[in-house]
Image: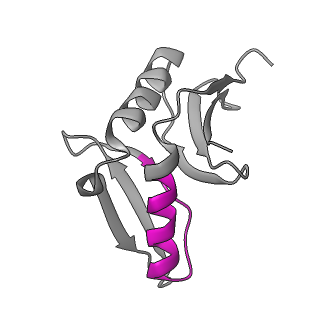
Amino acid sequence: MAGWFELAKASNGQFKFVLKAGNGEVILSSELYTNQAGATNGIASVQNNAADPARYEVKVASNGKHHFNLKAANHQVIGSSQLYASEAACRNGIASVQANGGSATVKDLTRA
């Protein structure tokens, strides 16, 4: 099963999105956007940039766990991953975003 995006409204009224893998696991989370159009543009940016390996930045948190950011061509962070116990698991997360990030399926939860 292919992945999909979920667009939602945060408790503070701002908008955010997540990219989910085919198994329903969140593999990328966005920042908060002041309006729905900004979040929708963020989804389009993921769709355009996810396949490019050069767009990923792997980092190590202070607790030693690995995570990554997906960046646009202008180096702005589009989305961030969860923390992973190993670099290999983090690389698998990147592969999942690359495989699912081009999805055209957007579930709009803002109307729920």
Most distant residue in the left direction: 74
Question: Which quarter shows the C terminus?
Answer: top right
Residue 55 location in percent, x, y?
27, 52
Residue at 55 percent across and 74 percent down: it is 84
Residue 17 location in percent, x, y?
57, 35
Decide: is 90 above or below 72.
Answer: below
Question: Which quarter shows the N terminus?
Answer: top right
User: So how many labels did they put on this image?
Assistant: 0
Residue at 48 percent across and 22 percent down: it is 40
Q: Is residue 102 magenta?
A: no
Residue 71 location in percent, x, y?
30, 47
Most distant residue in the front direction: 1
Foreground pick, 85 / 63: 85
Foreground pick, 37 / 47: 47
Residue at 48 percent across and 28 percent down: it is 33
Q: Is residue 91 magenta?
A: yes
Residue 2 position by quadrant: top right
Residue 49 location in percent, x, y?
32, 41
Question: Which contiguous range is marked in magenta?
Answer: 79-97
Residue at 52 percent across and 34 percent down: it is 103
What colour scheme does the image use?
one colour
Decide: is 16 above or below 62.
Answer: above
